Every structure is written in C-alpha cells, then in structure tokens.
Image (tube, coloured by chain):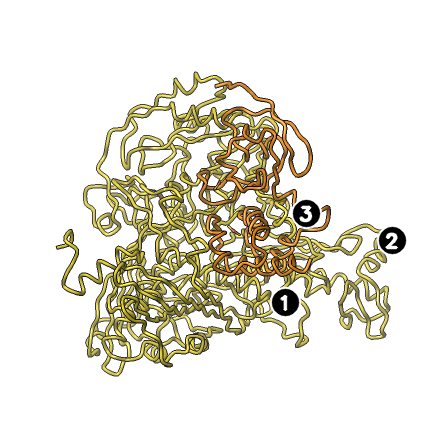
Amino acid sequence: MSTHVDAPAPVERKAPTTTQIGRSIPRLESRAKVTGEAEYIHNLRLPGMLYGKIFRSTVPHGRIVRIDTRAAKELPGVFAVITGEDVRALIPDPYYGPAFHDQPVLAIDKVRYVGEPVAVALSEDPHIAEHAANLIEAEYEDLPAVFDEVEAAAATQVFVHDALRPAGMFPDLKHLHGRTKTNVALDFTLRRNDVEQGFAQADYVFEHVFRTPTVAHTALEPIVSVAEPRGPQALTIHTSSQSPSFVRSEVARLLGWPENRVRVRTAFLGGGFGAKLYIKLEAMVAVLALMVKRPVKISLTMEEQFYTITKHATTVHLKTGVTKAGKITARQCEAWWNGGAYADIGPRVTQKSGFTAAGPYDIENVALNSYAVYTNLPPAGALRGFGIPQLVWAYESHTDLIARELEIDPLEFRRANILRDGRPQATGTIMHDIATVEVLDALSSAMRWGESFDRGKGSIRRGHGIAIGFKACIAPTTSGAIVNLYGDGSCAVYCGTVDMGQGSDTVMAQIAAEVLGLDPQSVSVIHPDTDVTPYDMATLGSRSTFHMGNAVRLAALEAREKLFAIAGKALEADPSLLTVADNGVSAPSGRRLSIADVIKSTFLMQAGNIIGTGSFRPTYTSPSQGDGQSDDITPFWMVGAVGAEVEVDTETGRVRVTRLVNVADVGTPINPGIVTRQLNGGALMQLGFTMSEAVRFDNGQAVNASLADYKIPGILDIPDQTLAKIVAGCQSTGPFGAKGVGETGTFAVSPAIANAVHDAVGVRIFDLPLTPETVYRALRAAQHNPLEDQQ
Amino acid sequence: MSPQLRHISFTLNGNSVTAEVAPHHTLVEMLQEQFHLYGARESCGQGLCGCCTVIVNGRSVSGCLYLAAFADQANIVTVEGLAKGEQLDPVQEAFVSCSGFQCGFCTSGFILMVNQLLEKNANPTEDEIRHYLSGNLCRCATYPDIISAVHAAATTLRKE
Ligand code: FES
Ligand code: FES
C-alpha cells in the first residue's frame, strides 16, 4: 500500500532529539566531485552517436521563405540536415511547452526571435556538424518585431503569435484558447477590498516605476541532451534536466506514445537555476534520433544558452497610499513580464509570483495586475526566485523611498507594516509558520541597525540598506519516493529530485536515515530515471526539501513499519514498541537485531527487499478568477531579508558591496551547512544580477552573449563579508519542520543594495543593474549637471 | 575536412601515453575522447571560466583553447591525477571538509589552481587567494567556502 497524504501531514513531534536532522554532514557525492569523476550528462558518449549543431535565426521576426541545406548536406561526414518541415513529417503538430503549446521543435513557417533553432546538422564529428550548420542558408521575409514588454502588451499591429494555444494543463489558462490579436499570454488579477478607498484614506500617495533587464542563467554545465532510440517503439533520453517527469510526458505527448515508452534519466547537473526545466533540447534530440535511428547528442555552447532561456525583464509600476503615521492603507501594482517569443513557464511566474507583488506587508486594500507578454526576444522562464527578485526589487525600493519621504526609519517602517503569522496575505490565505518578525529582528542585530555608522569621506561614501521579500511555494505539486532496504541491510532512496548542486541527495539521505536509524553516508540516492524513480513534478521553486522530503519520510516510515512487523516476530516483541538505531532494531527487552538479520529472518538468506513508498501532495485552493482570492494558496512561505553595506565612489559611480548579510526563515534546517551555502550562493548570484548582469539587445540580437561581455560574479566581486543567518523556525507541515531554501537568499539583495546606495549618496536607481555608468549618471543628474548625452 | 592526424606522446598523470590528434583538437577533447578523463570540461570555451583547467609542464592552461598537439612530449596533470589511490590530496580533502563546491562543475579547475597557488605560496592571504583564483568562475558562487578550503589546505600542507 502506498502512503498518500493529501492534507498537510502534521509532523509527529517524536523523541525531542533527532540524530541526523540538523547535522551538517558533507555531501554524499563529495569524493566524486573533488576527483573529477562525478557523472554529468555532459560526459556521455554512446556507440554510434551523432552530434547535432543548431542553425539559428538571424532575424527577430520573419516568415521563412527558403532554407537551403544543400551545401551542408554535401559536406563529407555529414549524416543528415533536418529542418522544421522534416520534423512535421514525423509529428504533424510539433509544438511544446508547459503552459502553452507554442514552441516548435524547429521553426515552422515563421521565426520569432534571433537565435531560434531553424535546422540541425548531424555528424559523428562535432566539428563537421558545426561546419555544416555554418553552411546552411535561410531567407526570411522580415516582419515588424516588438521587444519592449509594455509596448508589446499594448500592441495593436504586431503579434508574436497568431493565436494563443494554452496547453490545457492549467485551468486558469483554458479561457485563453484561440485568442488572437494579442501578445498578452496571461493577465492575472488580484483584488482585495477597495484600493481606491484605501488611497482616499491615505495622507500621501507614492508612485514609482522600476525595471529589471533580461539576465541569463549561465549554468557552467551548458544545457545538454542525448536521445537514444531503443528500436522504433521506445526511446531513452539522457538529459541535464531539472524536470525528468515533465520531459517524459511532454515527449510522449508529442510522439503520440504512452509515457512508458519514453525513459528519461539525469545525472548530476552542473548547475540549473531554472534554465534546465521543461523542454529545452529534449524534444529536438528525441525527434532527430527517431528520424536517423541513431543516438543524437546536442550540447549547447555558453553563447547558445543565452538564446535558449533567460529570466524575464520586467516593468513594475507601484502606487502606495500611506498615513502620516506610516501605516500603508493601499497598494496597487502593475507588472509586465517580458516573456520572449515562447511562453515557457512565464504565465506561471506571472500568477504564482504576481500574487505576492504587494510585498510582505499587512495591507487592507490591494489591487494587482500581472501580465505575461510575448515579445520577439529569446524565451524567458524560471530563474532562481521565479519572478520574486524582480518584484522585490520594485516593492522594496518603493517601500524605502516611502519611509525616507516620511522620515521614518526604514526598518521601523517595515516592522510596523509587516505581515505577521496568523494574518491574511493579499490572496486572503492566512499565513502560518512564517517568521517575518523574527527575520527582521535578526537582520536588525546582524546589521547593528540604529548604531552609529561610518559614512566614509572624500569621494568614497558609505551607506547601508535593508530589504525583505517573501515567496509562496508553487502549488499544487506532487512528489513520490521509494525507500528500499536490500538483503544486506543497505538502503537506497529512489527519488526524482535532481541534485544540481543544492545538495538534495544528502538531505534526502538524512531524512531516510533519520527514520530508519542509518548512517546517511551509507544511504544511496538513485538519480532520476523515469523507468525507476516515481513521479516528481520537478526540481524547482525550492519545493524539493518540503515535497520530496515529505515523500521520502513517508516512504521510510512505511519501510520501517514493515521492518518492525518482521522484527517483532524475530525479537518476540510488540512491533509498536520497537526502535531503530545504528543499523539495527531493538526491543524494550534489550534484544537487538541488525537490519540485515531482520531481513534474513524472513527471506532466510541475504535476499529480498523491504520497500516503502510515499507520495505527497499538499492541499490547495486555486485563486478565483477575477479577484485572485484563495483560502489555501500555498503549502509554505519563504521569507528572506538582506542587509547591505556599500562604498560608492562618487568620481566613478563604482559601487563596492563590502558586507552582505542575508537572513532567512528556513523552518528547521535538515543540514545547516548546505542551507547556509544555498543562501550565500543565491545571494551572490543575485549580486551579479544587481551589479553587472544584463543581456543587451540590438534589434533583438543579443550582443553580449558570452562570459567575456556578460559579467557574472567572480571571486574578486564578492563582498569582504558574506553572511547567512538562519532564523530557525518550524514549518509544521514540513519533514522534521523543514521548508525550502534554494531561492530565499536571492529575494532582497538588489533593493538592499540600491537602498544602501541611496543612503550613501542620496540618489535612487530605478533600473537594474547598478553599473558604475548608471550610478554616475544618476549622481550627475542629482547635481543638476547631467552628462551631455542626457541633456 | 579530414585533417591529418598527428601521433604524439606525453606523460599523463605520471604514465607515458600516446594519442592521435588532429590539428584543431583541443586538450579537453583529447582527454575526454581518448582517455575518458572528464574532470577537465568545457563550459565557456573561451578561456574565461577555468572549468577546463589542466596542468601542462607545471603551468595551468585552459584546456578548451590549448591545442592537443602541443601536448607532445609534455607532462600533463589533470584533477584525476591528484589522489594517490584512495588517498585524496590535501586540497581535495579541504574542498570536502569545507564543502568548497555545490554543483561541482567548476571544482576540478579550482582544485588544480589552488594546488598551483600553494606550491608557490604556502600561506596566502585572502587577498592573494582571491587574485590567484580570479580566472575561475563558479556560478553556484561557492566562493566563501572555496576561500575557507584554501586556508584549510594551506594549514595542512604547512604541517606536512
Ligand atoms: S571552458 Fe575553458 S576557460 Fe571556460
Ligand atoms: S560549484 Fe557549481 S559552478 Fe562552482
């Protein structure tokens, strides 16, 4: 029997001390990673394998007039050259996507962004494949293109897609089916009470507009997939994917096959950050492999990653009413998300993050509109935070400006308005297990807020700033797990969570080990393989520790129950009184058997299995259409606050972050070392998005798609001090009190730094990133002496 | 495009080996295709990230740009050559105990660079560490733990 829990499972507050929870054990795969032997799909070579190289669109929007593949095909060593028309011969409707079926395997009829895959050249030699791809020529009839999210939303002439094609998976997108003459893929609306009345009650009303640019994930292991036909009827896909279960169902759907004919497996991922979700190269390699009847591998270059998936550029308009005493009475927010040419998961970002756009504040009257917008840019999807960092950038910059205007200490202003445990969030959902107040308190002491602060001198000015953000975990999603005790007493956990560096293998092993009385280092965690591991929605949105952690815990509990039933006989004891520790089962009498001996007692030799299964899906109420209200919008909330100390060089505009403190409510951490590293890693990644990163486009062409021109943080860019503070709370529905943490460190970094810059030099930056040029221009403008080209 | 293959011989992690390489083959390609060593790996392909670091005649090179043909007669060390059997080298040990990695894709490059740093400077300051490692990128941003790992390895090595 499988243990399936629909309702949040209350954590059994068992023996007050746990042995494996809260321990910072080293990662299970440590040795493999320091010896260079860790398995990545990047390493995979199969007999007879062909390499594919993609020929990409050079225009942002155009009708395909002609694709000339003759020269490429004639190149010695080329096995085949495939175009969208060839794909259509195999799959009549080759469009995929998690929210909309809008993205073709290879462009058909039209191209919609510069960099869109148009054809693929295949060869046993990757250099020949590359050469052949360079010989392909295409002719396009240029169509007018649209790049800006606000313009695209309002467009009346230029449409990226002729008609909307919702995937049907999400009920709130169904009504969009067939809609034409629009670039808005989803318009999410939330209304709480009466925002106009709230503004009327206010003494002051503030309005600002904030923007963030397109940025890129640049996982150091570039996206890679290999498809391997197993006869005409079955297929294995080896892929650097964060969502193997989705890949299986979507590829099966495209091929018109049942899911059990598609096997999808992963290995360690060399970083994911949201880039490796849903379908990236998988549909392409699957179709190619079936067409040529050989294994096909496509590995992107770093440059190609910029053309494959990005993070949404945004424009966020905020309006807030506030009383003289500093009470927020109303907040209105309009957010435009630049989704690029294909929706990917953008409409989910728009809704799931959109409903938090008023910030972690207790506001009576709220009106939110969030628009997912198609443009002729590369597709945007999830990137560590799922839209939250863009929103926090806006609402925490805005909140700081308001506090400043009211001459109220920014921390006190936040404290006075903060959403507390037990209060309703803008959706109406009552917040539980959310340590907002504790996080602010911990931030205050870590920043020594209110104490005297060295403001610098001469051209180097110092300032400090704070910000706080929150996120709701995506819902409703399911995770399944199997815990298997083998005949020798060793244990394996089968789970579809992908370890892409966040340390999930270790955390799942700790959870299983805690339940079964094992050493976590001895537990093996079987990597996602859809022929072997149960369904998991995906490794995204900080959901795995909570969802998969609960599933693994339930599976381990079921295995333990079976173990106790057998051991009860062997030890002549009541199974309900047995305990586990140190690989053995003990009875109150003091008698003890190793787990191996318990198993032997029933299978009579070193043989057999004891298998427990677990499946976990939290409850959920979808927001009602129109006002976005729900009494159960999420299984848990994440809260992250950041404090930054900066030095601004007023002569160059250069900002140096000297100290970055991030404080997070993580529930009860299973492995505090891993949690700390995730928090710091998230914060430092967001530091890049704050200080330097922006994909620049010229007529839709990314002009800095290389690590040479697109600057991600190096070791010299990190602050003198980077600090993560864990506020230990308890997520009562989480496994041993834990909640997700992978994104929390990112939330509040950008506005904390901009607020610190304002504190230091009195200028406000509204558009990320805070490059020296942006800051210097703002300084000059504030001196009423703008740079000449701005006059 | 069927280039002339060249026969080269060199020392790879202490063993004498030979290989057939085309003029355009890089060191990383050769190590992966002919020796099944995947610790040096291509990421940026432009000499900017250090994931492909290999030690050639005692100096670190970007294996994504360094041509395999130049390995002829050279002494090549990759991350796979550091451990002595089961025994990790002190830098590897320090990366484990300080968790100087997350996804691990950049780790080989960092470990080789840290080895090279500590050969030259047994007790580097944080500033020296940062400057020495500034050519290696880690998108997981495990930098604070990498710095701790360098200090830990330096301490161990000084005791040896
Ligand atoms: S892959 Fe060689 S330096 Fe980046
Ligand atoms: S550990 Fe992931 S890139 Fe460094």
Which numbered dot is residue B83? Answer: 3
Residue B54 or residue A69, whichever sits in front: B54
Amino acid marked by disc 3: Ala
Number of marks = 3
Say which chain tag 3 marks: B
> Which residue is disc 2 drawn over?
A604
Q: CA distance from mark 3 to mark 1?
A: 28 Å
The chain letter of the yellow chain reads A
Quarter that holds the C terminus of chain A: bottom left
**Front: mark 3 or 1:** 3
At a point 17% along the width and 55% down the height, the residue shown is: A787
> Which residue is disc 1 drawn over?
A23
Q: Quadrant of residue A196?
A: bottom left
Quarter that holds the N terminus of chain A: bottom right
Q: CA distance from mark 2 to mark 1?
A: 36 Å
Q: Position of residue A352 (x, y in %)?
A: 39, 59
Let me know if residue A329 appears in the view: yes
**SS assignment at label 1:** loop
At a point 30% along the width and 28% down the height, the residue shown is: A64
